[in-house]
């Protein structure tokens, strides 16, 4: 069962009162934001655009770059979705094929949240790449083949996985949150990535046997800068 303080946090975290200046005009008439998420509608438009990029077929053997984008996730208590959160992603990658150390550093920040059917409001806190989890980039080579007299060229695809953790708060409530981004690279030379967000949160002032008091699940997109 979800601790009552966690439920109060969920309701505070996803409060239905809009914060002036934080919402884009696509979210019910709020003042357009000059930085940060524009709510779930803004996220969806960008996610759809990036998702339409063809999968990477020339995955490089090394990447030194910064990727930025957004994540959007539903927040679920013990039985139902109670709202959603949107946040900015900024990840630096320093990777060479075969590397065993975490190639990622960076953050998820500038969070906004809302209760189901409500408006978005700001959430304080930042999640940072957690090196206690194995962040990875994988390069997969599919050799050239000939089928029915037609030669199919070699393809090099790529995938990624990284975990971020930290504290998020609103008013007097704070939670420890952990999210994992897992997905595939898109575009020439791994210029973008999309995939799934998974994870959860615990009330920072309590401890219990459950891994998480509530679940976080959604999707993300990244583009190389």
Image: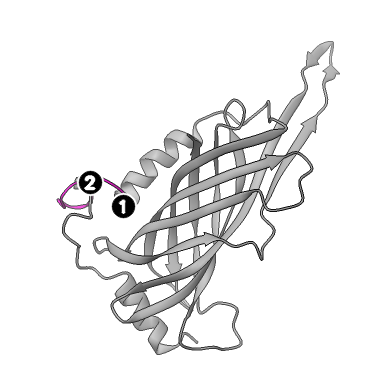
Q: Where is residue 104 in the image (x, y as percent from the top left)?
A: 61, 50
Q: Where is residue 59 in the image (x, y as percent from the top left)?
A: 68, 30
Asked if residue 157 is among those painted magenta in the image, a careful observer would answer no
Q: Which residue lies furthest to the top in this view?
A: 149
Residue 116 showing in the rendered view: no
The numbered dot on residue 66 is: none
Where is residue 168, by image quadrant? Answer: bottom left
Q: Where is residue 127 in the image (x, y as percent from the top left)?
A: 48, 62
Q: Residues within 10 Å of mark 1 (few under 14, many from 20)?
A: many
Where is residue 139, by image quadrant? Answer: top right
Q: How crowded is mark 2: few (under 14 residues within 10 Å), some or many (20 or more)?
A: some
Q: Where 5 sits versus 184, above or below?
A: below
- Which residue is identified by label 2? 26
Q: Which of marks 1 and 2 is nearer the N terminus?
A: 2
Total labels: the figure holds 2
Q: Which is more toward the observer, 219 or 149?
A: 219
Tell me whether circle 1 and circle 2 mark residues in contact (CB < 8 Å).
yes
- Residue occupying image coordinates x 64% and y 36%: 63
**Cα separation between marks 1 and 2:** 8 Å
Q: Label 1: state its secondary structure.
A: helix
Q: Where is residue 130 in the image (x, y as percent from the top left)?
A: 59, 62
Q: Label 2: state its secondary structure.
A: helix
Q: In this view, does 174 lie to the left or right of 154?
A: left
Q: Look at the magenta stretch and give its main secondary structure.
A: loop
Asked if residue 27 is among those painted magenta in the image, a careful observer would answer yes
- Residue occupying image coordinates x 64% and y 42%: 94
Magenta segment boundaries in residue numbering: 26-35
Q: Where 121 sits versus 36, above or below?
A: below
The numbered dot on residue 39 is: 1
């Amino acid at each position: 069962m979800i601790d009552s303080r966690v439920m109060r946090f969920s309701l505070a975290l996803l409060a239905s009162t809009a914060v002036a200046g934080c919402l884009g005009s696509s979210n019910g008439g709020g003042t357009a934001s000059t930085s940060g998420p524009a709510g779930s509608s803004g996220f969806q438009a960008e996610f759809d655009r990036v998702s339409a990029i063809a999968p990477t077929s020339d995955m490089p053997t090394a990447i030194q770059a910064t990727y930025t984008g957004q994540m959007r996730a539903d927040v679920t208590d013990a039985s139902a979705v109670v709202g959603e959160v949107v946040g900015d992603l900024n990840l630096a990658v320093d990777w060479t094929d075969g590397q065993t150390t975490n190639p990622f550093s960076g953050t998820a920040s500038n969070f906004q949240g809302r209760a189901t059917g409500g408006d978005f409001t700001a959430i304080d806190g930042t999640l940072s790449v957690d090196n206690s989890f194995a962040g990875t980039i994988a390069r997969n080579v599919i050799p050239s083949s000939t089928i029915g007299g037609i030669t199919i060229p070699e393809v090099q695809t790529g995938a990624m996985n990284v975990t971020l953790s930290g504290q998020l708060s609103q008013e007097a409530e704070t939670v420890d949150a952990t999210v994992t981004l897992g997905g595939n690279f898109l575009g020439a030379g791994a210029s973008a990535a999309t995939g799934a967000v998974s994870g959860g949160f615990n009330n920072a002032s309590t401890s219990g046997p459950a891994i998480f008091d509530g679940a976080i699940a959604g999707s993300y997109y990244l583009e190389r800068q």
